[in-house]
Structures are given as structure tokens and as C-alpha cells.
Amino acid sequence: IPDTAMKVFYDPGCLLHDPPYEILSGQLVPYFESPARARNIKHELESSPSFKIIGAEGDLDVLKYVRMVHNEDYIQYLRTAYQEWVEDGGDKSAVLPETFPHPKLTSVLPSEYNPDVKTLCPIAKAGFYCFDLSCPITEATYMAITASARAAISAAKSLTSSAKPSGPESSVFALSRPPGHHAGSSLCGGYCFFNNVAIAVRFLQDSHASTMSEGSNPQGEMLPIAILDIDYHHGNGTQEIFYSDGSVLYVSLHAQNDYPYFTGSTKEKGSGEGLNRNINFPLPRGTTDESYSSTLRSAASHIKHFNPAYLAVRCATAPALSPKASADLERDATSLGVDTYKDDPISDFKLTHACYGEIGRIIARLDKPTLFVMEGGYAVDALGSNVRAVLEGFEGTD
Ligand code: OKS
Ligand code: ZN
């Protein structure tokens, strides 16, 4: 293994979350965000000398960093929800909500809606902490989401101890799963429970603060970090977590008018100290290599101007399906009985395989220590090779 091999952090606990089904396009289908996704990526990267798989660090205080992002009641909910649900007579397969506190359902203004959550029954709690039906909580979910965060923190930790300040030698990939960017400070949804990238970003900021002598940072300034979200979907959770935080720039490229539907417009610019530090680039269906990479270049120019100490990239292959991947997706989907897949927006982006490498090269030109964290992508058989193309484009090893 060459010493320039990119470190890939992985925790087998990530495989434990394995709900039986989900509702997609109105149909009950096997859960798309499956353990097979992580296995496929690991297998692909293992077979290349450009990568080195490393076990996540066992003795990290994961909860310490989870608490820097998520509220305590939400964390305790995720930890205890399954047991409470089963004790209440709920189905043993998983916790799922029934109703949500929609602003027009609750009898008071949304800002005044503040129930005593402890008094809610398990199925009501499930709706309180979730915004859709994509996050069934199984007996093993809490272990899996902790493992997923552990992989992201371990990767971030290795960045802080890297000899080189920037460039390929100081870049790492966290093979995290379940994903994180839809998870907000007290909200799960879109397969996401803990926001892995947000947790890793807080870890990096905390490590930096603790290395500073007391006198040298009297204002307690936080280390500036940029998050580039190249998942096909908008990262509503990451946007919410850092919305009024001036130390973190969130930049997202995503499909307009697609899941999660109600966030991701250019009007969402951040607030207070975080004003202009939230930048959304919604893209139309049918987006091609050329328009995707030129949008990514302008996104990158905002990051360059912000001049972060670190760059965190949420990697996903959904926006860049190769013709083969699209075929796989359609085939898988058909075998699962989802006949609407031709119309599925995921296959509406028209990027070719060559675009993956280019995406990696554009990110590499920012010349920052970079943390890649896995997010979405369902074309299981093509996942590994697509992830590999982005990372090898970045490293210049393609
Ligand atoms: C419906 C699931 C809808 C798609 C969720 C998208 C997840 C994703 N049960 N986010 O980046 O890939
Ligand atoms: Zn996605």
C-alpha cells in the first residue's frame, strides 16, 4: 500500500440498522438505504491500492460530539424509542410515526407549540421527532447511528493529526451509514438520524479550540469550516443546524422541487451571524455534466472566498449516475415493484461517469484538508465505483 493511499474509516456497527421496508412513491418496498450499500463501497475501495480501510476508533467519546449538534431529549428519544414502543405493544419490526405536528394541525402558533414530550405516547413521540416515514427505528438503530457518527469522527480526528496541512495526503473518507444530512438538531427523516458531517465539524472545531492557549483566543472564535453538499437531495438538517452560525459555511447543490421539497431555495441565506453563510444551488431536472460542473465551480469560488481551515464534503453518487448505474437502478427498482422509476427524479440528472472524476478535481483545487463523508445513493451495484471515481479524481490517481 503506497503511503499516499487515502484512509477510509469504517465501523461494522453501521450494518446493524436494517429495517424491513419503506414507503416510496406510494408503495411498500424493501428499505433502499440498506447495509448492502456500505458493503459494496467497502468492497470496491478494498480492491484498490489507492485506499486503505481503517477501523473506527473504539475509545472515542462519540456522545460528547453528538451532544454538540443534537438536543439531549432527541438523543434520549432515539436511544429509548424502540424499547418504549415494544413495551406499549408496538410492532416488533420498528417504530414508525402516524401523525406529525403540522403547523395547521396544532391548535396554537408553531412557535408556541411546545408540548410536554414526556407525556406523549410512543407513536406520538415518533411523529414529534420525525418528518417523514423513512426512519423506522429498529432494536439496533441506536447502535448503528452511533457507529456511523464514530466513523465520521474517527476520520475527522485523523485529519487533525495529519502531517500535511492540505492536499491529498491530508484527506480522508468516512464510510458512514446511516447517512446524516436530513437530520436536524431534534429531527430525523430521509434515512438520517444523527448528522454525521455536522458532528465531525464540531469535533474539528472543538479539537482546534482545545489546542489554543487561553490568551490567544479571548473571543472564543470558532475555526471556520465549509461544508459542500453534493448529494442529489438538499441537506435540510445541516442547513438548520448551522443556519445562524457564522463559523460554518454550508453550500449545497441539489435537485430543485425534489425531496425534501420544502427547503433548499436560494432565498435561504442564513440568519444573524450566519447570514450569507448558507448558499443553495437548486438545479433543474435534466442537469448535464457541463451545467453541474460549472455550478460546482461557482460553489467552489464561494468556499475559496470563505477560506475555511477544513472542507467537509458529503459524498453521494445520486447526482451523478452513470448510464450503467441508471440501468441498475431501474432494474433493481423494477424487481422491487416500483414501476414509477422512469419518472423518478434521481435518474433525471444526466451526468456521465466522466463527471465524477471532474467533481473530484474541482474539489481538489480548493487545496484544503478535506473530509469526505458518505451520504445517499441507491444504485447499490454501482455505488462503490462511483464513490471511487470522485475520490480518485480528487487524489489524481484516476
Ligand atoms: C421515501 C424516501 C425518499 C427519499 C429520501 C432521500 C434520501 C437521500 N421513503 N437523501 O440524501 O438520499
Ligand atoms: Zn440523497
Image (tube, grey):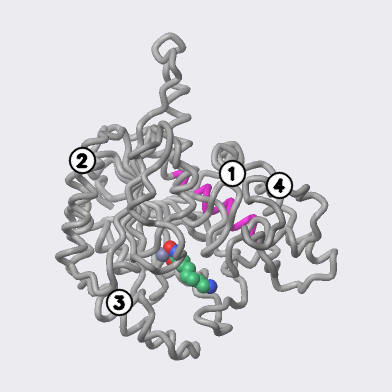
Element assignment for label 4: loop
Q: State the SS at label 1.
A: loop
For the residues carrying marks 4 and 2, which lies nearer the camera in this image?
A: 4
Among the 4 quarters of the image, the one containing residue 220: top left
As measured in the structure, the alpha-carbon distance from the residue carrying label 3 to the one carrying label 4 is 40 Å
Q: How many marks?
A: 4
Q: Three-letter amino acid code at disc 2? A: Asp
Determine the secondary structure under disc 2. Answer: loop
Q: Which residue is mark 2?
A: 367
Q: Which residues are magenta?
A: 140-154
141 drawn magenta: yes
Q: Label 1 sits on what residue type? A: His
To which residue does mark 4 refer? 114
Predominant SS along the magenta part: helix
Q: Which dot marks residue 103? A: none
- Measured in 3D between alpha carbons, the distance from the residue under mark 4 to the one under mark 2, in whole angstroms, is 45 Å
Q: Amino acid at mark 4?
A: Asn
| Nearer-N-terminus badge (1/2) | 1
Is 126 inside the magenta-drawn segment?
no
Where residue 77 sits: x, y (%)?
Answer: 71, 52
Local crowd at mark 4 within 10 Å, few (<14), some, or many (≥20)?
few
